[in-house]
Amino acid sequence: MSAQSENMPVMRSAALFAADAILAVLLGALMVFSALRPAAHVWTGPVWLRLVIAVVSAAAVGTRRLAPLSSLSVAVLSSIVAWTLGFERDSFLTVALVLYVVAASRPPRRAGLLLAGSVATTAVAYLVAVPPSAIHPSPTWWQVLGVAATPIAIEAVGWALGLAVYRQRSYVEAVRTQAAQEVRAQTELAARSAAEERLRIARELHDVVAHAMSVITVQAGVARYIDDALPARTSAALATIESTGRQALRDMRQLLGVLRAEGEQVASSPAPALADLDELVEGLRAAGTSVELRVGGEVRQLPEGLELSAYRIVQEALTNVVKHAATDRARVDLRYEPRELAIEIVDDGAGARAGMSGSGHGLVGMRERAALHGGSLEAGPLPVRGYRVAARLPVAAPLEVVPA
């Protein structure tokens, strides 16, 4: 996290405290004006007392974020005294402004109880300090309720606005928490998918290397006994090749055998290669998906592991076309270049779709296979319609045999 991000909450708090200070000054000025011009029908008291109450009421608003409950208590008591001294309705604003912060920072049930207590206290005190008879010579019941409703309405508005802010903050926090959980789940899923794909690649490479080493050891063994006239040193070298190959093969089977799932057997058939793409394409065509296979460049035999990875990339991309593309047409382009093998799979389906995002199992596996050979893989929707998967796999230059 950057220093700017860390300072944002501090700057926001400072701005809120500054706004409260400005609001307290404005409210204090209004209260001082009311203190100098009290209502004529109540006991007004000395001027200094009215000014002190005005300052205390403004201070309750200025400190409402530091100590909301204490500020609420001070606001309610100062409002009762202010009404007694003839401040009319200005002191209601103090309680309403503090109730806003209380409702915005406390659970709704607790904030509701504080609202009820504040309203009951201030309404009764207002009826005592400013009785309806002082305003209406013969007040009716609705006039009495009207007088009591004045503090209730003003304070309830402040509380309701605070409650709306609390619910909005709770919603935003819930969304943020859910988003963080989804990101964490996606990260864990991607890591697990990558680990599973690496295990699968390791198992397949085990089969490929095991096959090659088996050929080496068999050929070395045959060379030792095919001709008794071999020189002693050549025979010893072949014997070393044979024993080393057998030992390496045995060790590799012991170490990598644990990567196989329980009950999984070693494949008896050869690992698939690019020559098997015709069979893969024919199978998809028989299933109803028309796949066009194009091959360009100088077709040649590539390393067995690279051909296996290239085959799996094409296979997985075509599988995603069948599952997610909502189309029955696709194209596979293979191009044998001097130093790399270029692969491109394109369809005219739905474009961006489920299962083909960067965190999906299929793309994780294809990227792992491309990275295994030092290559790269790109995948994404086309500008108008369709989806494209493109991989480039470097091909090692063949070894040159130097004549003796």
Image: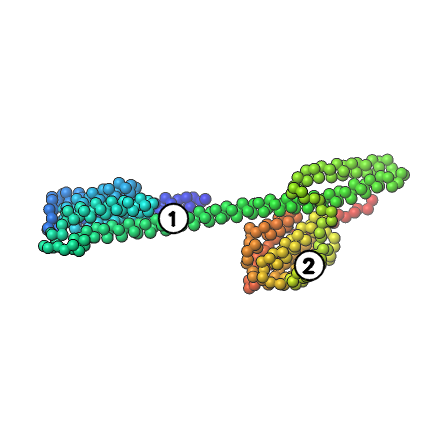
- Per the image, the residue denoted by label 2 is 283
Q: How far apart are marks 2 and 1 (CA)?
A: 54 Å
Q: Position of residue 95 (x, y in %)?
A: 24, 47
Name the residue at 62% across, 47% down. 197
347 in relation to 168, above or below: below
Looking at the image, residue 250 sits to the left or right of residue 232; the answer is: left
- Per the image, the residue denoted by label 1 is 170
Q: Earlier in the sequence, mark 2 or mark 1?
A: 1
Task: Say which mark, if any, is on residue 314.
Answer: none
Q: Position of residue 116 (x, y in %)?
A: 26, 46
232 in relation to 160, above or below: above
Q: Where is residue 392 in the image (x, y as percent from the top left)?
A: 64, 54
Q: What residue type is labelled 1?
A: Ser
Q: Where is residue 302 in the image (x, y as percent from the top left)?
A: 72, 51
230 in relation to 270, above or below: above
Name the residue at 54% across, 45% down. 188
Q: In which quarter of the image is the C terminus?
A: top right
